[in-house]
Image: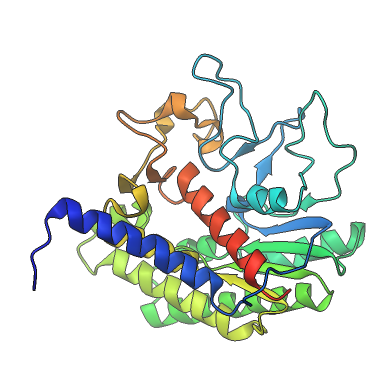
Amino acid sequence: MMDLGPDLLRRALGGVVVAAALLGAACGGDSEQNKFVATRLVAFGDESSLLVDSGDHNARKYSVNGIVSDTDPTIACATNPIWIQAVATLYGLVFPECNPGPTPVVDPPSRIRASFGARAADLAAQIDAQQAEIPLQSGDIATVMVGANDVIAEYAQYPTLSEAELIANVEAAGAETGRQVNRISDTGAKVLLSTIVDVGVTPFGVAERAAHTDVDRAALLTRMSFRYNAAMRATIINDGRRIGLILLDEFVSLVAKFPGAGGFTNSTTGVCDLTKSALTPPSILDCTSKTFITDGSNAYLWADDRHLGATGQSNLGALAITRAQNNPF
């Protein structure tokens, strides 16, 4: 076999990561540009799809927050958009939480039902809340990403619960997510559903491996994440016309496996220095480029030990847009 130098290999693998991710996002689509145009976006799931508005319609996010400039640290919620914002922009939509002046959109109809710490069992209540306000219908697009908190919460019970019991619990959670996604699609709304990241390759998973010697804890988290995603995928009605599946797990795992791939300079460390957080408990809600760790940058995959950073969210948004444009909705 020809011996590729490390720089050449890194560049080659970077291309493979991007190509594989885009192909994964586009599989099952049509050759023609899809004609579906959403008139409203409703976001369900956990904090990776959440914008937190403190009352000024200039929300913060559980990622790296954008700021006005290097000399003005004022939060700019449209900068460093998370994936649901990227999808909303595709259709010319905004969320009330990120709708600052001087010319805000009047009464934007899109909604965020996602919540911090949400797990699969919380999806039903999120959907109920939306149905009680303005029910989902044809012309709406919904985004769903939930399950990472299920994996982490179940893992916390190890070794009191065996791996087999943990797997059974996350599979049940994945199936519940699938059922609720089907419920959304039954309303006539189109759905963009993301798999969860492989929690085993997050900084949280890396730290758990280092902290324990009984078993490879990161590998356990990887197996749990895989089984959650598998159960969810087995439950959804995935004919391509109702639900568009985004394979975030495959993209993140490839980036983690090949350091430097996809332009990421670090895939094992959170870029936010939580000791600089003014919140209690410390949170990435006030993470900006001004509070990075030494030598940190937006080329880090992770914001903290489990949430995607700005470029990670950007890549997820790109995958979601590719899926929305290629699925025969």
In the picture, measured across the screen, residue 325 lies left or right of residue 107, that is left
Tell me residue 253's x, y (percent).
Answer: 36, 64
91 or 175, which lies in front? 91
Q: Is residue 111 above or below residue 61?
A: below
Q: Residue lying furthest top in this view?
A: 71
Tell me residue 228's x, y (percent).
Answer: 50, 75
Q: Is residue 4 above or below residue 178?
A: above
- Looking at the rendered image, the quarter that the N terminus falls into is bottom left
Q: Residue at x 67, y 54 (%)?
A: 87
In the picture, measured across the screen, residue 166 lies left or right of residue 294, that is right
Q: Is residue 132 visible?
A: yes
Residue 296 location, quadrant: top left
Tell me residue 190's x, y (percent).
Answer: 75, 70
Q: Is residue 258 visible?
A: no
Tell me residue 131's x, y (percent).
Answer: 87, 64
267 or 282, which lies in front? 267
- Looking at the rendered image, the quarter that the C terminus falls into is bottom right
275 or 110, which lies in front? 110
Counting the numbered discs, the total is 0
Residue 233 location, quadrant: bottom right
Residue 39 location, quadrant: bottom right
251 or 49, which lies in front? 251
Q: Residue at x 71, y 74 (%)?
A: 180
Q: Residue at x 82, y 63 (%)?
A: 140
In the picture, measured across the screen, residue 328 lies left or right of residue 252, that is right
Q: Residue at x 19, y 55 (%)?
A: 8
Q: Residue lying furthest front in this view?
A: 32
- Please say which color scheme the image uses: rainbow
Q: Is residue 162 above or below residue 124?
A: below
